[in-house]
Amino acid sequence: MVGLQHPFQCLRYVSRQPAGLSDVILATAGRELFSFDVSSGQRLDVWPQPVDAAPAGESSGATTASEGQAPPEKRRKLSSPADDEKNAETEPEAKSKESKKDESNSWTNIPLLTVAQSKYAVIMTGEDKCVRVLSLAEDGKLKQLSARTLPKKLSALTLTPDENTILVGDKFGDVYAFPLVPSADYVKTQPAAKPYEPSATNLTVHTKRNLESLEQQLKYAALSKTNSEERVVLNFEHQLIIGHVSLLTDLISVVRPADSNVGARNYILTADRDEHIRVSRGVPQAHVIEQYCFGHTSFVNNLCVPSWDPKVLISGGGDNYLLVWNWLENQILQKVELPKSETEIVVSGIWDVSFSPAAGDVASVQTIFVALEGSTQLYCYALENGNTLTLKQTLDLCGNVIDLTAIDSKGSIIVSVDTLRQPNSITAWKSVSQPPLETFRVSSGKWAPIEDSMVLAINSAGTSSVPEGLEQKKQDELNDAVYGLSKLRKRDGSDD
């Protein structure tokens, strides 16, 4: 592998065996989304396609008459010469605006990815605050179905348990819900804004102080009118369901299992920069706050509810410990100290992995994996009797851990590692990239590295390349795209 290449920022395994199709891995690297065949590691598709990758023989949009066709009928000119001159003047301006619009819709990374119903990929593109839904065809091809732009920069993405509704959280603390597949009959409505009008006038106010106050009110009224005219109206069906007063960092949707007192119920768990974990009811009662889980002293940016025990919550963030909760009862079950580090600890990922005995001919596996930002170590915990989290093993990888996904059909995991930065660093760059994936499987009760033909094929193909001689500003932007969690930490008692 030559030169520098983007690491896989997100990994997702898509099981399609119930539908009689081959399993797929979806992965994001740089501004692109890749699909791979699990059995062979073959790259099935890359989205978006390069501009110059149009099929041979396909025209750019202009059509010409063939020799066997009659010439097109002459169109009757309906506009006046004055109209023609006006159109000639406005046409370049319109093209310029369209070009700027296309440029504003570009992005450099895809930090959030999830999969719906094993046939849709839902991604969040970085700079344009856009949630895009793509179809995953039987042959692994990707095609964009919808693009919905939110008013604020997004920080969290998930689905409701039925996988029919997308939930997104932004950096202003708001959570929106909208359908996975947009409704064709939705009509955008513009809410009527009531202009602000001061009750007083120059005829009723005479003192200098009151005249100054009236002048300020008139300026405010004019500003309010301008803001209302420039207000962006979301042109798709949506609902604002939750609001935090702080930056929202993580968001998960959970089904509370039925018991003797109450049936199954949906909940939404949200975390923010102000050390809060909020438990709200699911849609359409998300406005009902059941409780808060307090116990962290720094920001919380990772929430994990194990699939085999949905009453347990594991949370982590800027503290040097994890908390294990009975989130239904707002009870801390355990405080788990993280291994000591010379630098500030930031939990960058918590993943639950479980395999049945039939998965890849391995014993039953239930593991909680934890990664720290800018660290090559992956911590393997077991959730034992009494919901006690115990460190069982530490895996050392060749690069910083970025993301992880479990391959159910093989009973293994694949881990995305940083191909650009030096091990245990978030700023120092390498001169040559390394393979972006490593794979592990349980052997004799321990996770051990293995060689997998699928992973070897993916590593051999590589990802998208990073330009040589990248200036420091661009390097810093790429660093922040992967390692931005430490900026959530409050400094010197600052609340902003």
Image (cartoon, grey):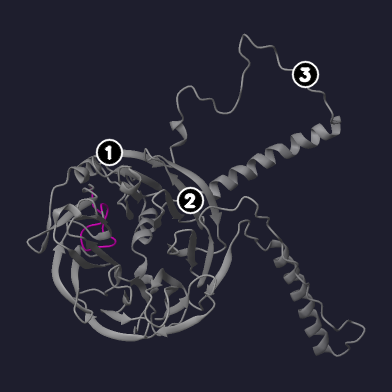
User: Are the residues tagged 1 and 3 within 8 Å (C-beta)?
Assistant: no
- Can you give x and y, in whole percent of width and height, for residue 86 in the image? 80, 37
Q: Residues within 10 Å of mark 2 (few under 14, many from 20)?
A: many
* Residue behind mark 1: 42
- Amino acid at the residue labelled 1: Gln
- Can you give x and y, in whole percent of width and height, for residue 429 in the image? 26, 55
**Tag shown at residue 196:** none
- Amino acid at the residue labelled 2: Val
- Position of 290 relative to 172 (above/below): below
Query: Which quadrant would residue 221 be assigned to in this image?
Result: bottom right
How far apart marks 3 and 2 lie (CA) works out to 42 Å
- Amino acid at the residue labelled 3: Lys
Q: Residues within 10 Å of mark 3 (few under 14, many from 20)?
A: few
Region in magenta: 419-431
Q: Left or right of 383: which side holds 272?
A: right
How far apart marks 1 and 2 lie (CA) works out to 23 Å
* Residue behind mark 3: 74
User: Are the residues tagged 3 and 2 within 8 Å (C-beta)?
Assistant: no
Query: Which quadrant would residue 139 be assigned to in this image?
Result: top left
Mark 1 or mark 3: whose residue is earlier in sequence: 1
Query: Which quadrant would residue 287 be assigned to in this image?
Result: bottom right
* Residue behind mark 2: 133
